[in-house]
Amino acid sequence: MMRKFLFVLPVLAAGVLMAQNVDITDWIRGQGGKPALAVTEFRGSGTQQFMGPFNATLFSDLQSSGLFEMKSKSMFPLANPQRPEDLRQEDNKQGYALQDWSGAPVGASHVVFGYSAAVNGVLVLYGYVYDARQTDPQAAQLLYGRYTGTLDDAGAIKTAHEFANDIIQKFGGTGSLLGSRIYFVSNRSGNQELWTMDWDGNNQKQLTNLKSISITPGISADGSRLAFTTYARVSPRIMVLNTETGRTQPFYNQEASLNTTPGFSPDGKLIYYASTASGSSQIVVAGADGQGFRRVSHRNAVEVEPKVNPKNPGILLFVSGPGAQQIYRMNTDGAGVERITNGEGEASNPAWHPDGQHLAFAWTRGYAAGDWNIFVMDVGTKQYVQLTHSEGKNENPTWAPDGRHLVFTSNRSGRSQLYTMLADGTQVKQLTQQGTNKYPVWGSK
Amino acid sequence: MTTKILSPVRSTSLRWAGLSLSLAMVLLAGGCKKKVPVPPPPAPVTQPAAAPAAPAPARPNIADFAAEPSTIERGQSANLRWAVTGSNDVVIDNGIGTVPANGSRTVRPTESTTYTLTAKGPGGTATKTARIVVSAPAPPPPPPPPPANTKGTVESRLQSDLKDALYDYDSNNIRDDARAILTADADALKRIFADFPSATIALEGHCDERGSAEYNLGLGDRRSNSARDFLIQLGIPAEKLKPISYGKERPQCTEATESCYQSNRRAHFAPGQ
């Protein structure tokens, strides 16, 4: 898959290369190379029995971020520093000098080390990241963190997640998977209800018990509210749910045969949705309680899935005809309608990347109607990359808060299930097994 | 096995042979023993011979008097046929009157009638009857008994009386076949609303599985509303038909074939809620 992906690269023009930091497109293209991490084995003082889970979690979090080239432990020197005081200018490849890590055979750009100790009944983790290419240890420290947890596996794993998250942020990650959750629709209870789980698929829990059809959730940027479509009151209506309490919040549905595909504005104060109040499904906007609604567009075509740009709340994407469904943009005053996808096949499910510049979406380009694949496109240049290649139908991609992972649905194993992958199409991981699972969104909590 | 069957057969025929022989001997023995003398004949009666009487004139003879057929349904006719000799005064009653000695007559009795033929002649009078039985026509079968509940339920009536209108892919245009179906549906709906004045009907729009779920919600709504507009034009009250789109959330068929896709691209009637 990576090879296919790289094959596409020369086709793409250089329009998005100027972005600072770790740009999603730079990163997808593999420009500039990745930091090469040597993550040493952490040991514990009075906490050694918890360090197995700690080391596994730290390595896994860093690897799955996709940000790093993870160096093989089999090449590491026999000794490694546990504290900054251990570092020397020269150690003859024994492991206490930075060049022992940057030179052959390890070849790391950075070394990650530290230790844990039991302090007054609490597990304390000391973590460091040093630039191994520096000769002077005094100038090489990139990160130091102190983390606490309970004196057990769970406490150790918690500190590993937190440390890994800080490392990822340090290397330009724009958001964090830490504490993030995936919300989705499952029929495993017998009805299509909303469910939630940790981003790695653990702790799957039912959120609603409406005993109806509930679909198309959208989540507020802070992860506190879900807005979705439900048939619980016969006609498809929008309902808003507090993700922490599981309680519904008032939402005024205007009189229409269909109110659906709600999405929050970046500040959470508005909900854009599609309504047939005017006769045809068109984009409308209302307050988060449904009051004060007004029509945004005046086109005579089926319009659904309004998605407001996270960086520029005056722009939204939506899906519409006439003709085969495609992705369009417009200003939130209804002006400036422009088709984003090129008219080939059918396109749907636009999902803004946190950078407000790229979108992931589902497209049948190059395949028969109904054979959806996940693509990522730069809205500015209209250049795109195909991430799945007809392994079943692949739909409903949405970005993780870190901007590097996607959750999506695929029926590659039979029924529709949820998968995550890195935004280059690698590290595909199935999260659900039970029933049919659809409509994922990735919340920051 | 063969011998077991044959042996009793043989013994039976032997027994019959023996019986016939002994019977013959008894008869022969009887014939031999009857040696009694024959009695003389009775003395002849001596009476004066009667003078031969003058020949009497022959009585009329009704050789034939019959109805053909002898049983008719009311309104049908029968044929009376007769043949008389020795008479020149032949009369049939029931309004027929004097007839020739030989003949036939078509009659249409409205009820069962016995015809009497009277033949008078020098030798006397002879009568004979012929009866025509007139039956009422078979009555028509009784009307079928009314079913316990002629109206059924709204749901059963929707199921039995209405058909889905089908659509092309990504379209809400009413096709010619859907036009015919919806026209018939409008008549059926009028009958249903006559029987269930308070009923409302959900007019569901459905889509096949290929378009995105979100877009299909909007497309299904258009299908529902296009069928609804058509029915309203045909006189169905707008408030009786509630449009509702299920997109592709409730397919009636889940195979990836065109025939399955087609059966899912539909406007469908369900009881309103």
Image: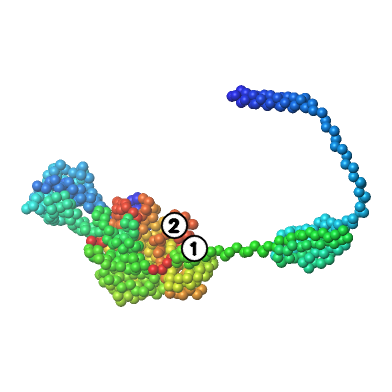
- Label 1: how many residues lie within 10 Å, few (<14), some (14-19) or many (20+)? few
Q: Nearer the viewer, residue B234 or B19?
A: B19
Q: Earlier in the sequence, mark 1 or mark 2?
A: 1
Q: Quadrant of residue B24?
A: top right
Rendered location of residue A43, percent (x, y): 13, 46
A187 with respect to B102 (left or right): left
Rendered location of residue A371, percent (x, y): 41, 56
Q: How many marks?
A: 2
Q: Is residue A116 visible?
A: yes
Where the N terminus of chain B falls, by quadrant?
top right
The chain carrying label 2 is B
> Spatial distance from mark 1 to mark 2, Cα to Cα?
19 Å
Q: Amino acid at mark 1?
A: Ser
From the image, tell me which residue sits under label 2: B253
Q: Nearer the viewer, residue A356 or B192?
A: B192
B41 with respect to B144 (left or right): right
The answer to whether B184 is drawn above or below residue B262 in the figure is below
From the image, tell me which residue sits under label 1: B160
Q: Residue at x 85, y 58 (%)?
A: B60
Labels 1 and 2 within one chain = yes
**Please, what secondary structure does the residue beneath circle 2 have?**
loop
The answer to whether B37 is drawn above or below residue A99 in the figure is above
Q: Residue at x 74, y 58 (%)?
A: B69
